[in-house]
Image (cartoon, grey):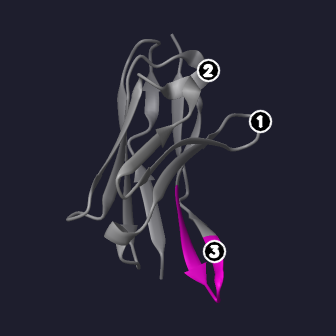
Amino acid sequence: QVQLVESGGGLVQPGGSLRLSCAASGFRFSRYTMSWYRQAPGKERELVVTIAAGSINYADFVKGRFTISRDNAKNTVYLQMNSLKPEDTAVYYCNTKLLNLGALRDYWGQGTQVTVSS
């Protein structure tokens, strides 16, 4: 059974930092692309960053501030968020896409709330 469990969210002041973690299980973690998405109140879920074998792609709005990494030995992907802004406030979700009955299926964690406010 595929499971993604996020942690590390919280309340932080503008300019501060947080590190999110996503612990994965139920699939061969090292073989698959992992992503972080976020969803702010009243807005659609948006892609923040993706890490695949040999490539990392950041959304423009986080370039230079956020860093994704993964530890395949721990089946965990991280999101280091620096220089946080109020507009980064959102629920952050871990995601992977796996083949299921011949089609790619999205798997999501439960999300972790990040609130940037003074």
Q: Residue at x 57, y 17 (%)?
A: 86
Residue placed under numbered mark 1 in the picture:
43
Q: Amino acid at mark 3?
A: Leu
Q: Amino acid at mark 2?
A: Glu
**Quadrant location of residue 44?**
top right
Instruction: Give the mark nearer the N terminus: 3 vs 1.
Output: 1
Residue placed under numbered mark 3 in the picture:
104
What range is drawn magenta here?
Answer: 95-105
Rounded to the nearest angstrom, the CA distance separating label 3 from label 1 is 25 Å
x%, y% of residue 27?
40, 78
Q: Nearer the viewer, residue 56 or 72?
A: 56
Instruction: Give the mark nearer the N terminus: 3 vs 2.
Output: 2
Residue 40: say if magenta.
Answer: no
Rounded to the nearest angstrom, the CA distance separating label 3 from label 2 is 31 Å
On screen, 99 above or below 41? below
Check whether the beta carbons of the residues at disc 1 and disc 2 lie within 8 A of each other.
no
Q: Amino acid at mark 1?
A: Lys
**Quadrant location of residue 82?**
top left
Residue placed under numbered mark 2 in the picture:
87
Q: Residue at x 54, y 74 (%)?
A: 98
Pair 3/2: label in front: 3
